Amino acid sequence: MSEKGTEGQGEILMSINSIKDPDKDTDWQRRELEASQLFSPAAPINAADLFAGRREEIKRFISAIAERGRHVILYGERGVGKTSLASIFHFLLSESSQIIRIRKQASPDDNYTSLWKKVFRDLTYTVTESTGYGNHNEKIKSVADLYGDKITSDDVAREIQESKKSTVIIFDEFDKIYDIETKKLMSHTIKLLSDLGVNSTIVIVGVAEDINTIVEEHASVKRNLEEIKMPRMTKEELIEILTERLPRLNLTIHKNAQSKIVRLSRGLPEYVHALGRNAAIHAIRNKEKAIDMRSVNAAIETFLHQSDQSSNNSFKKAVHSNKKNALYEHVLLACSLAETDDEGMFVAKSIISPLSAILNRKISISSFQATLAAFCKEDRGRILDKHGKARAFKYRFHEPKMQPYIIMKGMLSGKITEKILNTLWSPK
């Protein structure tokens, strides 16, 4: 979401809060609209006071920006909040910092020149032109107009130096860049800016397990980089998303309802936003002051009904079989419930317990090993990625958002019952 969009959202919230109508129905309508604004599953969080958790990552991010010659690599799974962090950090700085923030989104078609052309369009300079008879007129022009088909790292260093302003330049979704030369040039640029002591910071944001896949040849610039890995959110951080928003709606939430939302999200903030919003709206429409399990269950149904077709197609492709006794769906449901690390990784052994509960019989790894391997192949949509070496493989959903989605599909079909969830998710 652009900063302009953020301002618009703020205006909407301000106008909502300014409504003072004694009519109770109007008040409930106001709160429903506000719930839709406070929760944002489909867009990065921009308002700093609504950004939950990530205190250690924020601290490291701001410290790197404050240190001359230091740059940032922000990486992790898709959907863990990297873009949101890159979008709100400037709200957390003091007003005297006067840092200019330029954020550009990378695309597969970009190369080094096109990326910096995007940045240069936001850098301006003033020229004075004579209008005759001793009169002059000042015009503001874009730095991008000074360059043709090629921009070099020296050009970048010169323009950033000449701007004489502290600038944070964010390249979001940098993992979409396939051109190796672009990655090498970006590494060289980071090193050059560091060596020159330029008071500006480059932030590379991308999906990767390792920064090797984001910036090539990073070894030469490793000492100039702050590598910030964004893991999945903790239970406490996910709860904070709810506790920061619900009081603004004059709503409370039952502990078991809160726990269900948090557990279903599997560490992904998008799902706390989606289920929290839907549950809040359900409670408000029923003129209830607290979110209970009924509201959460209604939120799940609403979410599945509104989900994009691609998620449903991916699920169907992964589990399709003409064999009546095929276990594809059951194994996939078990994968979604498997115990994971903070990166969403799980091992084959962790599937045994949920699959045994779903099938109501004891299961061994050998009974689903071939199915697990099939999920990593293209003919089943590569719904899982396999990492590591033989006998030590780890698995993870290729699209992290599929994991909570599949759990909720299983709940709706009745294959995952509340009893199974309570057994698997009971305190150890």
Image (cartoon, rainbow, N blue to C red):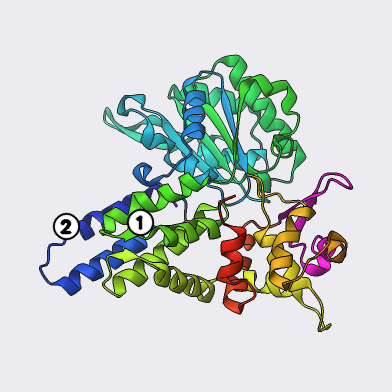
Q: Which numbered disc, 1 or 2, marks the residue closer to the eye?
A: 1
- The residue located at (74%, 59%) in the rendering is 351
Q: Quadrant of residue 182?
A: top right
Count of numbered tags: 2
Q: Quadrant of residue 94?
A: top left
Q: Position of residue 341 (x, y in %)?
A: 66, 45
The magenta stretch spans residue 166: no
Q: Could you tell whether 142 is left or right of 6 in the image?
A: right
Residue in front for this viewpoint, 394 or 13:
394
Mark earlier in primary sequence (1, 2) = 2
Residue in front for this viewpoint, 112 or 197:
197
Looking at the rendering, the stretch of residues picked out in magenta corresponds to 370-397
Q: Position of residue 399 (x, y in %)?
A: 66, 58
Amino acid under disc 1: Leu
Circle 1 residues within 10 Å: few <14, some 14–19, many ≥20: many
Q: Could you tell whether 97 is left or right of 21 in the image?
A: right
On residue 11, the disc is none
Q: CA distance from mark 1 to mark 2?
A: 16 Å
- The residue located at (37%, 30%) in the rendering is 93
On residue 38, the disc is 1
**Whether residue 2 is visible:** no
Q: Position of residue 419 (x, y in %)?
A: 58, 69
- The residue located at (49%, 56%) in the rendering is 262
Circle 2 residues within 10 Å: few <14, some 14–19, many ≥20: few
As helix, strand or loop, the secondary structure at mark 2 comes to: loop
Q: Quadrant of residue 125?
A: top left
The magenta stretch spans residue 390: yes
In this rendering, the answer to whether 100 lies above or below 300 is: above
In this rendering, the answer to whether 155 lies above or below 325 is: above
Amino acid under disc 2: Ser
Q: Kindly identify which residue carries mark 2.
A: 18
